[in-house]
Image (cartoon, grey):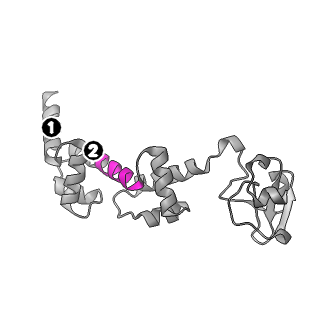
């Protein structure tokens, strides 16, 4: 069991769990957390035994969830999307975003792009442009006001991003929306 723990062997997941006395946490054998000292480790047949002994589940490997239902990368992706969607108007930095979801910025950038096809920065731009389109279509706000409201620091960066994503300037998009509403 110790060898499986040290090598983070996923073949032993579900066969036993290990707990670390100094942290009060229990993990799956495949957990990639720092290797504990042998003298601080206890082994358990199942998660229930570890919890009864007073240990809490690791947040990284989530031993309290079924093996098939937990994908730690998916959890990171979903948390990142949620943060971006709830704070799109703020100045979001990759370092801060990565810190909030508990991974390095390089790891976040790589897994987010692999899973979604976007980097976190590209996803933020996509959400901002969606919000801008909604506002341009439903309000009488100027495109300048909308650009600042959705989080752009300069109007030129808003115009460039909008044109890159839609093929139209914000004014052209708003005019097209108004024309479409008038035709109906």
Q: Quadrant of the C terminus?
A: top left
Who comes first in sequence, dot 2 or dot 1? Answer: 2
Q: Is residue 67 above or below residue 7?
A: above
Q: Disc 2 to disc 1, how far (Cα)?
A: 13 Å
Q: Residue at x 52, y 63 (%)?
A: 104
Residue with the mark numbered 1: 176
Q: Is residue 69 above or below residue 102?
A: above
SS for tag 1?
A: helix
Q: Is residue 135 left or right of residue 17?
A: left
Q: Residue at x 16, y 32 (%)?
A: 180
Chain part drawn in magenta: 120-130
Residue with the mark numbered 2: 134
Q: Is residue 19 left or right of residue 67?
A: right
Residue 126 location (% of width, % of height): 33, 48
Closer to us: 141 or 32 = 32
Residue 67 location (% of width, % of height): 71, 44
């Amino acid at each position: 069991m110790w060898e499986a723990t040290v090598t983070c062997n996923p073949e032993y997941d579900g066969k036993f769990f290990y707990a670390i006395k100094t942290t009060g946490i229990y993990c799956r054998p495949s957990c990639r957390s720092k290797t504990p000292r042998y003298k601080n480790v206890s082994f358990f047949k199942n998660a229930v035994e570890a919890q009864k002994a007073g240990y809490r589940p690791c947040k990284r490997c989530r031993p309290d969830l079924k093996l098939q239902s937990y994908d730690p990368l998916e959890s990171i992706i979903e948390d990142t999307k949620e943060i971006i969607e709830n704070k799109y108007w703020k100045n979001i930095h990759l370092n801060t975003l990565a810190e909030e979801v508990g991974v390095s910025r390089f790891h976040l950038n790589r897994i987010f792009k692999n899973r979604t096809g976007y980097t976190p920065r590209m996803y933020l731009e996509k959400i901002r442009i969606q919000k801008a389109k909604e506002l341009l279509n439903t309000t009488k706000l100027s495109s300048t006001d909308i650009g600042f409201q959705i989080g752009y620091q300069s109007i030129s960066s808003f115009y460039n991003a909008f044109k890159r994503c839609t093929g139209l300037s914000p004014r052209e998009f708003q005019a097209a929306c108004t024309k479409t509403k008038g035709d109906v």
